[in-house]
Image (cartoon, grey):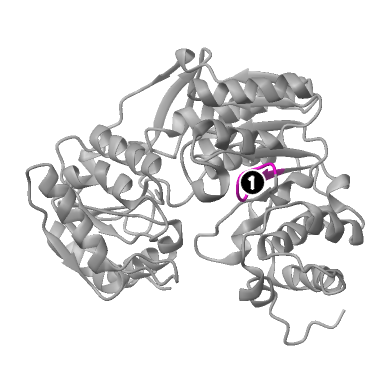
């Protein structure tokens, strides 16, 4: 197929297709035209508000470790579009992305109702996984569940519902019960469901849907989870500075025990052992379904999992942490992690937030912890201006009977440089607010450190 000059990313991201139009008719027709590639695959389907990406990656890494050819479909991407579609941990090659997108475009252009951006991406992913003859695919829901494009999956081996919170309320509903109903839409007849121990109003909905569908439900048992304390303050005094471009290793491995087995994870957020328990329960369920997943493989898969921008320590001197927290729940768990692993420390925050998020709710957890706040307007049409962000921070600080050291910068390069100067070599910088800003922050940090781009 002729692909000279065709840009698959530009095609998928065409602005007129970026609207959110929930429903399965378009994606069903598109995949039907492609020969229903999803029916050639087996799936773990993952929905929820927080933790989806980490849980998907724990599961996919372990399946890959067991020798299965494993597809992974996640969103959004951090640094490059191809991250969203992976096979055995490798991003889809650009030539393959081009070829598959051309095949998808041919069918999409013949439809009366053109598919949306996410529907195109979902079709590209499933077609690529089918062409690669993946043994199993771990697929993350894009938005909601019931009408999400990924919900063309007919009979997943396992469904996972992560922690639910109030996000995208204008689309999914303004209560946990309404959101749970949308997320539980991924549950299919007779499937196996693993859920976070949700709030009562949410778990009641999930239990009801499972009963209606004849699905088995297992709720992660946090009573059987114990987590060893982790203290990162030693990284503030490390004199060699050798970890500028590498994740610190032994000192930042979390140890936890679940259902009598001890595990280690490189993901150091205080919520990560809880996320890992859902992945472990899903993996044991897969084993009951016939997948060859010995205990030692599961332990090794959990330990090998790496997932960027989730309380990621990117450098030292100062200690620089990047977190993709983008809703109040995410900000709260980030704040809890900071208090646990860096007790008594006051970070300098670099913050860029989208205006359609509950940013006052996000800031409420963070403002009391900060020594200074460097505000940025993210390069996104939905961005909250740095000026409005600064005013919100000052208002919250005032409500707590305090004042806030608020700075404004023109972009992330200036913000990273300024925040590192304020923090000093033995201080802490924490950048958060939006997954869409992570790539800009990391590029700025690499430039500040003199690391080749």
- Tag 1 secondary structure: loop
Q: Position of residue 287 (x, y in %)?
A: 73, 23
Viewed as shown, does residue 121 lie left or right of 61? right
What residue does disc 1 label? Answer: 141
Q: Residue furthest bottom?
A: 5
Q: Position of residue 170 (x, y in %)?
A: 51, 50
Viewed as shown, does residue 279 lie left or right of 253? right
Q: Quadrant of the C terminus?
A: bottom left
Residue 143 inside the magenta-drawn segment: yes
Residue 396 vs residue 317, the one in the foreground: 396
Q: Quadrant of the N terminus?
A: bottom right
Q: Position of residue 67 (x, y in %)?
A: 73, 39
Residue 85 inside the magenta-drawn segment: no
- Which residue is depicted at the point 19% across and 60% down? 391
Tell me which segment is drawn in magenta.
138-146
Viewed as shown, does residue 413 lie left or right of 130? left
Residue 336 vs residue 209, the one in the foreground: 209
Q: Quadrant of residue 46?
A: top right
Q: Is residue 294 visible?
A: no
Q: Quadrant of residue 42?
A: top right
Viewed as shown, does residue 316 lie left or right of 265? left
Residue 352 vs residue 175, the one in the foreground: 175
Q: Is residue 333 above or below residue 357?
A: above
Q: Is residue 39 visible?
A: yes
Q: Is residue 228 above or below residue 65?
A: above
């Amino acid at each position: 197929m002729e692909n000279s000059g065709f840009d698959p990313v530009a095609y998928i991201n065409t602005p007129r297709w970026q609207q959110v139009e929930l429903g399965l008719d378009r994606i069903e027709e598109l995949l039907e035209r492609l020969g229903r590639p999803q029916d050639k695959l087996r799936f773990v389907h993952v929905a929820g508000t927080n933790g989806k990406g980490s849980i998907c990656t724990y599961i996919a890494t372990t399946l890959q470790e067991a020798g299965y050819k494993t597809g992974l479909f996640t969103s959004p991407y951090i640094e490059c579009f191809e991250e969203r579609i992976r096979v055995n941990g490798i991003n889809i090659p650009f030539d393959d992305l081009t070829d598959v997108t051309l095949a998808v475009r041919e069918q999409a252009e013949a439809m009366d109702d053109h598919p949306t951006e996410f529907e195109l991406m979902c079709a590209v992913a499933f077609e690529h996984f089918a062409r690669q003859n993946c043994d199993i695919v771990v697929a993350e829901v894009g938005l909601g569940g019931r009408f999400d494009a990924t919900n063309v999956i007919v009979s997943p081996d396992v469904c996972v519902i992560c922690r639910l919170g109030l996000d995208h309320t204008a689309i999914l509903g303004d209560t946990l019960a309404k959101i749970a109903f949308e997320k539980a839409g991924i549950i299919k007849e007779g499937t196996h469901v693993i859920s976070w121990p949700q709030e009562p109003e949410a778990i009641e909905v999930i239990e009801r849907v499972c009963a209606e569908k004849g699905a088995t439900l297992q709720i992660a048992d946090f009573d059987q989870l114990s987590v060893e304390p982790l203290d990162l303050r030693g990284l503030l005094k490390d004199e060699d500075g050798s970890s500028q471009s590498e994740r610190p290793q032994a000192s930042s491995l979390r140890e936890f025990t679940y259902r009598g087995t001890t595990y280690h994870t490189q993901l150091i957020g205080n919520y990560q052992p809880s996320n890992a328990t859902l992945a472990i329960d899903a993996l044991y369920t897969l084993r009951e379904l016939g997948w060859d997943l010995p205990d030692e493989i599961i332990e090794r898969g959990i330990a090998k999992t790496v997932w960027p921008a989730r309380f990621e320590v990117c450098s030292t001197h100062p200690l620089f942490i990047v977190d993709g927290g983008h809703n109040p729940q995410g900000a709260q768990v980030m704040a809890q992690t900071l208090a646990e692993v860096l007790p008594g420390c006051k970070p300098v925050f670099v913050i860029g937030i989208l205006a359609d998020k509950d940013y006052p709710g996000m800031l409420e957890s963070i403002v009391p912890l900060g020594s200074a706040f460097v505000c940025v307007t993210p390069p996104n049409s939905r961005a909250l201006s740095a000026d409005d962000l600064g005013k919100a921070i000052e208002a919250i600080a005032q409500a707590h009977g305090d004042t806030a050291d608020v700075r404004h910068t023109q972009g992330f390069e200036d913000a990273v440089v300024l925040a590192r100067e304020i923090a000093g070599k033995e201080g802490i910088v924490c950048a958060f607010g939006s997954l869409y800003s992570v790539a800009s922050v990391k590029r700025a940090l690499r430039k500040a450190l003199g690391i080749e781009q």
